Amino acid sequence: MHAPPTGTTGTPALPPQQSGTPARAAAQAAAAGPRARRPAPPWWMWAVVSGLFLVHATLSLRLHERLDSNAFDLGIFEQGVRSYAEGHLPVSEVKGPDFPLLGDHFSPVLALLAPFYLAWPSPRTLLVAQAALVAVSPLPLMRWAHRALGTVAALVIGVCYGLSWGIASATGFDFHEWVFAVPLLTCSLCALGQGRLRSAVLWALPMLLVKEDMGSTVAVIALLAAWRAGPGRRRWLGIAVAAGSVVWMLLTLLVVLPAFNPAGNYAYTGDLGGFPPGAGGGIGHVLEKVTIGLVTPETKVATTVMVLAPTLFLALRSPLVLVAVPTVLWRGLSEDSSHWGTGYHYSLTLMPIVFAAFLDALLRRGTTPAGLRRYLAGAAGVCLMLLPAYKLGELLKPEFWKTDPRVAVAQRVLARIPDGATVQASNQLVPHLSDRTSVSMFGWAASRPDPQWIVVDTGVPAELHWPLNPLQEWVALSDRRAAGYRTVTEEGGFVLLTRTR
């Protein structure tokens, strides 16, 4: 394939014929041949991948070392992966005694981490794997941008995507199964944008094993592939895949998850507050939720703006952005306020979508060299502006690297708990015990009662006490002592109790 034409400044410009219809773009991509369409990534792309891996792995591991990881979610996911590594279906003591995780979320993809966990049985295995999956995900975007727009565009898009706030929020908050969908999304959407429709659908299908909600995302990708295929058998194949994905999602929601869940239902139906029909509120409530409820409170609108801002809203010019609709809808319909904002991991799967749509929109517009420079500079500026506001900004703060003496005290106290013991622990201590004990959370109603050991960090700031506030925690510790637990040690705010009878 010839190098893309350049302007007088050396910035690649979009060849005019690529700004035509989707059918023409698909025909051109097919005519180029597989060898031309998929050259080996140049060395600098691997340098970007390596740099992103080091950044995200360092952030996650340092947060864990500082006791900033949590029972929800790192502790839960480690217990699930540990179960697979031990040769049985995933359970989590954090969720409840021998609670089957396939009754909570349908994420059998976690089994892929079992061999790595056997080699390195630690929560760090999950954090490193997450960093690797995030780091490799820009490769399809960079390869597409490199072929179509040149090296500078590929570098800027890859780095801005890899450091985007949605990904930083996720890697800065424990581990989540959605990370497996991130490289699948970039591969699928980049194939779709280049007219490789069969590849787009094949890359999307494994997402059905990531989480129960991904079926709707796969369905939208298949429908877009059907639309781009034009009339004929390939269009009906795409429609069939879309229908099959929806059926699969409904089966997991209505059959598989309730079958595994001890309560016999899907645990998160209540988050929709009125769905499915008959759950309460009537037709008026349903209409309100699907209209004004999607934009109120204003946090929902602000989050949508933040999702599109890294692409300067240009992503709205590409049909690929439609793949984000299912995620935006369920978050907007949810009654859980944590789903509305920009925190945690809920925007992780939106970043691949909007950046693929951004690149597709640049190509569809037939962007001039000067226009391309402006868009790339704007995207980089937004990325840099948002960087300090999210977890990656912590890496630039000197206090983030200072050694907290409480960490050494915590390690000393936790070391007194023998392997294989049953334990209740504070939220942020659970991930430091989940690799060698049967640990649940102190103060959580579903935790295994009467454990052999109880360890509580009373020194965390009041706003980080969860699920008990400081007063409730003090009362609960007093009750445990009255029930026959004795104090083994009380040091630096860490309290360790053991059962005497």
Image (cartoon, rainbow, N blue to C red):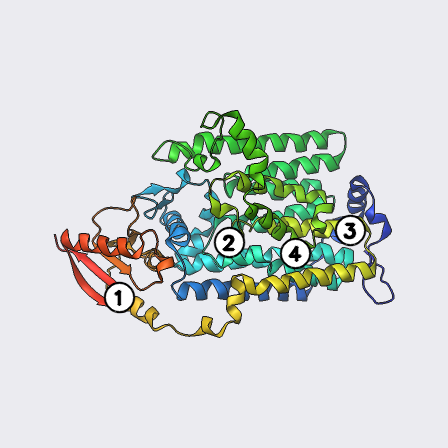
| Residue marked by disc 1 | 413
Helix, strand or loop at mark 4:
helix
The disc labelled 2 sits on which kind of residue? Answer: Gly
Category of crowding for the residue at label 1, using alpha-carbon neighbours closer than 10 angstroms: few (below 14), some (14–19), many (at least 20): some
For mark 3, give the secondary structure: helix
Looking at the image, tell me whether mark 4 or mark 1 is earlier in sequence order. 4
Whether residue 73 is visible, yes or no, is yes
Task: Give the CA distance from mark 1 to mark 3.
Answer: 58 Å
Say what amino acid the circle numbered 1 marks. Answer: Val
Mark 3 to mark 4 CA distance (whole Å)? 17 Å
Which disc is residue 343 wearing? 2
Which mark's residue is nearer the viewer, 3 or 2?
Answer: 2
Q: Position of residue 37 (x, y in %)?
A: 74, 51
Label 3 vs 2, first from the N-terminus: 2
User: Do the residues under discs 3 and 4 have CB atoms within 8 angstroms?
Assistant: no
Query: Which of these two is toward me, 39 or 238?
Result: 238
Judge whether residue 41 can be spotted in this image: no
**What residue is at 39 percent from the left and 53 percent from the top?**
78
**Within-10-Å neighbours for mark 4: few <14, some 14–19, many 20+:** many
Q: Earlier in the sequence, mark 3 or mark 4?
A: 4
**Which of label 4 and label 1 is nearer to you?**
4
Q: Which mark is residue 363?
A: 3
Mark 4 sits on what residue?
A: 310
Q: Quadrant of the N terminus?
A: bottom right
| Secondary element type, mark 2 | loop
Q: Residue 311: x and y, percent?
A: 68, 54
